Amino acid sequence: MTASSFPAPVSDTMPSSHDFAFMLPVHGEMAERIRAHDWSSSPAGAPSGWPAALKTTLSMMLGARFPMFLAWGDSHAYFYNDAFIDILADRHPSALGRRLADIAPEAWETVSSLIGRALAGQEVYHEDMPFKLRRKGYDEQAWFTVSYSPVLDDAGAAIGVLGVCVETTGRLHAEQARLEEIGRLREVFEQAPVPIAVLMGPEHRYEISNAMNQVFLQHRAVLGLPAAKALPEATEQGLIALLDQVYQSGEPYLGWEVPVTVGTASGTPALHYVNFIYQPIRDSLGRVIGIFSTGSDITSAVLATRALEASEQRFRTMIDAVPQMIWCASPDGANTYFNKQWYAFTGMPAGNLDGWMAVHPDDRACNAVQWRASVATGIPYEVKNRLRHHSGEYRWTLVRALPVRDAAGEVTEWMGTNTDIDEQERAVEALQQASARKDEFLAMLAHELRNPLAPISAAAELLALRAAQDAGVRQAAGIIARQVDHIVHLVDDLLDASRVTRGLIQLERSMLDMREVAAGALEQVRPLLERHRHHLAADLPASAVHVLGDGNRLVQVLANLLNNAAKYTPEGGHVSLAMKAGGETVEVCVADDGAGMTPDQLRQAFELFYQGERTLDRAQGGLGIGLALAKSLAQQHGGSIAASSDGPGKGSRFVLTLPRAAAGAPSGLSGVPLAAAGAQRASSRRVLVVDDNVDAALSLGLLLESMGHVVVTAHDAAAALARHREASFDAYLLDLGLPGVDGFALARLLRADPASASSLFVALTGYGQEQDKLASKAAGFDCHLVKPVGAAQLHEVLASCGAGIDAQGARIDSSSQPAP
């Protein structure tokens, strides 16, 4: 409420704001009413004439939170604060400024006596003093704790009285109700079959002690006495401290199997075990005023339980002494016990019996099925599972359990153990992974080396069969040069990988512009990008970005990242290189929209010899060295490489980060000794050679033509099928790793055509392990040749064909020809 809410004074003379400057820091309803009041008819007089003592007392009273009033001068002009409004009730706000005698005539006699004593210089204080008040339209009895103090003027004379009033009516009513309730409870408690006592006040005086409690206390006279005096031994046993705790905190206390010593008539103390509760008793205001106590004597049950526990403890001590995780389960399979080793291993809270929570989520279901089967049938239980260690990791354990049976053969309990076998399991897994990776690497290495060796071998043999000076020789020489170059790169990568693992790479550092490094890498990779028709986007800064490093090695790093992007991005996809220069670092991001990576692949992307999932066509190629080498070289330059991907099919990003610096002839080929194999000519055959390696197909075709055969080449399944539809062939030499439709599927399609059902099908591949040969046989191939293939071997295979053509091009039946 504000001053504007009050009726305007009727006086023509309004107090000025200066008159109430002493009240400036004070706010509230009564402060506003005092400012707005018409003081012209009040015995207090105009505010401009109020003495300093009145102003000071008013300022203090209005700021107080306790109910306070001020009776000023001989007429006892009445002032009061906001907290006093509820006490005045219907007399507010008309009481402000009036004579006290006119405000409450019914209480004037009592109040005037107190005021008189205060004006005489006495301190007046009374607790629970009765007053008759008119509230809510009728008179009622109320009680207050009051304090009246004189207010002195500048001369030291008492000129007013300051009263502080705190109503205690509710408390007194509650006390009366409590006494009545205790009377009713005493009658109920007296008939209860368990010990009950009610102790009141901070001294815990016995107000009620029923018959059963008196029996427990050996019929001592305790009513009206503090607990400490009635039961001296209770102090020594800590019971009085517990009562104090409950009384002060307001929180109940529950005691289980508490040993209590009680004196007897003979003087010999008796030990009892009791369950009891101390429950705080509160008044209507929520304050603790006493404690309700009840309990039961369980001495016999405790002694029997203690004997059983002592026996079990000996058993558990033996179990805990065993360096093994041991557990027990009830006949229905629920865990009932784990030893200390279990809790120490798992880190689970002692006493927690939910053992399945420690088992790896992937192992729970299958383990639970086997466990339920054992519980149902009584057969021993044995599994391996991963158990959560207290460190947070999961470790392999061997779990075994046997049933415990009674004399009738019924299962009464299961006893089980967990043995930590994590080191053994991990060692086995590591060996398996190492073996698998070794096998994969060897197979892949053989394939990668055999593919380029095949055209080299064919071209070399062709050179031996032809004259030195003709176009064919030059073409074969070009083939040899390209494939030798490919082998050199593979060997270089292998050598670099070896140097990385042994820390032998030496950097030749100089000041470099990273833009030129990026340009060099792009130039190296451009043929590969163009061959796959990739869309390349390069975003380089306009000004020089300097780093201190080995130029050749940094070109190699970026080229490896770009090569990786090109290999795993489908034809027509997008590859980008973006460079960003910061104050202290340079970032080069190589991104693509290709195959993407799983979280597992991201974690292993930079491991030596690691590759993503292999496809039969080995379209991505490589030895799994490039990224590992790139990361090692980046680290040697004080930088790093980070890989990220949104998942399979969503592309990958590799970010090279380097510290930014302040600006500042072909070798000849050695001769190859060649055999004169193939000089003998077999009957001419029509042969279809299908290989996605253009050089391999061309060199093999030239070699076969030099042997007198009619050769057609194709580089994918679609082209091969088109050639076949034009005319069938005596022999089909198919590379297995074709893009799209592989050699296996192509062989099945061609075999299904009656025109080529009896033709010779030869698998040409860089994979030569036993499982590879079995796979080609299952696909319908007559022969499995591992690259590179020599002329003699080709001669022998093609000689087994069922038909050929003569010198005039007519087909002949080879059944009449002698076996080669």
Image: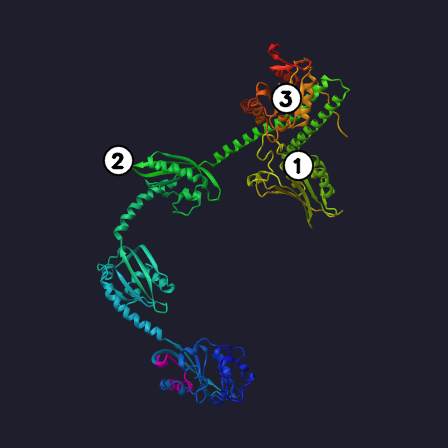
Residue visible at 49% across and 84% down in the picture = 37
Mark number, residue 727:
3
The image quarter in which residue 453 lies: top right
Q: Residue 231, position in %: x, y?
A: 28, 63
Q: Is residue 566 left or right of residue 126?
A: right
Q: Which residue was labeled with disc 1?
A: 563
Q: What element does badge 2 sit on?
A: loop
Tag count in the figure?
A: 3
Reply above or below: 395 against 1.
above
Task: Report which quarter residue 568 is drawn in.
Answer: top right
Residue 291 in the image, given as x and y percentages of width and height: 32, 64
Part of the protein shown in magenta: 110-138
**Left or right for 173, reference 578:** left
The residue that disc 2 covers is: 408
- Residue 532 location, x and y as percent? 66, 35
The residue depicted at 62 percent of the width and 15 percent of the height is: 803
Above-or-below relation of 398 to 26:
above
Q: Is residue 353 magenta?
A: no
Residue situated in front as seen by the camera: 34 or 680: 680
Identify the mark nearer the N-term, 2 or 3.
Answer: 2
User: Measured from the top left, where is residue 116 in percent x and y?
Assistant: 40, 87
Decide if residue 737 is in sight here: yes
Give the amino acid type for the residue marked by disc 1 in the picture.
Answer: Asn
Q: Which mark is residue 11?
A: none
